[in-house]
Amino acid sequence: MLAVFDPTVAKCPEGLRSPPVAGAAAAAGGAGAGALMKGFSDSHDGAVTVSLGPSGALAYSAANQNPLVPRLFGAVNDIFCLFQGHIENIANLKQHYGLSKTANEVTILIEAYRTLRDRGPVPASQVVRDLGGKFAFILYDTLSKSTFVAADADGSIPFFWGVDSENHLVFSDDAGLLKTGCGNSYAPFPKGCFYTTSGGLQSFEHPLHEVKAVPRVDSQGQMCGSTFKVDSESKKKQDASIPRVGSAADWSNQF
């Protein structure tokens, strides 16, 4: 799976972009959104790509997937979701969100997001924390032009992010594609974390604490993106209210 988002939709976090490596401009700078999507289509059989207009693009393929942690792709009411993995408490979540027995992980995530966006009964961190199992997902809301991306607390699914030469924020389970497209400005997506358009990168395991970048250095001593870790000494400011759709502060703007 692959998602490429424009900076107006998903801003690159500070520290993810690394200085270009001297003498390797093409690799270090990346190739841009168009080349990333083409590279995905060329290297994945049966690839499906979805243009999001100026906001970016999504791509999906079921080729060579692990049957224990399959990839899924779906859309409901202008909300797209790419998912890889397996949610173990899926039966409980279907009941919680009032979904049919045939609902899969993508359907559950879209409904969970819609509930969070429209009614906001619990924090986003709790919604992700309630997902049991192995997972990484990318969700995009075309109406609010908002992203919601997360990976499980154990980092069970290979999942990466980076920034390309056009300053697009890129997410994928294909490390080779990210390395080609983003050069040395890519890194594993931090486990136990989620990313939203308005809130940036946050930890769902430790939602009260800041997440800070720690520079990565490769075997040649070159800067290569950053890992992001929870800073136990730094706490975030919390908003006591939860704005909802129709209120003075629309909850959908939180994404």
Image (spheres, grey):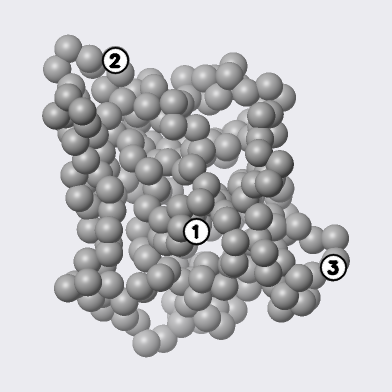
- Image position of 7 (left or right of 100): left
Circle 1 crowding by C-alpha within 10 Å: few under 14, some 14–19, many from 20:
many
* CA gap, disc 3 and disc 2: 49 Å
Give the x, y percent position of residue 122: 52, 81
Q: Residue at x 63, y 68 (%)?
A: 112
Q: Secondary structure at mark 3?
A: loop
- Amino acid type, mark 3: Ser
In this view of the protein, which residue sits in the foreground, 61 or 48? 61
Instruction: Determine if residue 11 is in view.
Output: yes
Q: Residue at x 35, y 58 (%)?
A: 201
Q: Residue at x 23, y 58 (%)?
A: 212
* CA gap, disc 2 and disc 1: 33 Å
Q: Residue at x 69, y 57 (%)?
A: 105
* CA gap, disc 3 and disc 1: 25 Å
Q: Quadrant of the N terminus?
A: top right
Give the x, y percent position of residue 46: 71, 24
- Amino acid type, mark 1: Asp
Q: Is residue 90 above or below residue 175?
A: below
Front tag of 3 and 1:
1
- Amino acid type, mark 2: Ala
Do the CB atoms of the residues marked 2 and 1 lie less than 8 Å apart? Answer: no
Circle 2 crowding by C-alpha within 10 Å: few under 14, some 14–19, many from 20:
some
Circle 3 crowding by C-alpha within 10 Å: few under 14, some 14–19, many from 20:
few
Q: Which mark is residue 26?
A: 2
Precedes in sequence: disc 3 or disc 2: 2
Q: Which mark is residue 152?
A: 1
Precedes in sequence: disc 3 or disc 1: 3
Q: Is residue 103 above or below residue 40?
A: below
Q: Residue furthest right?
A: 101
Q: Is residue 248 above or below residue 77?
A: below
Residue under label 3:
100
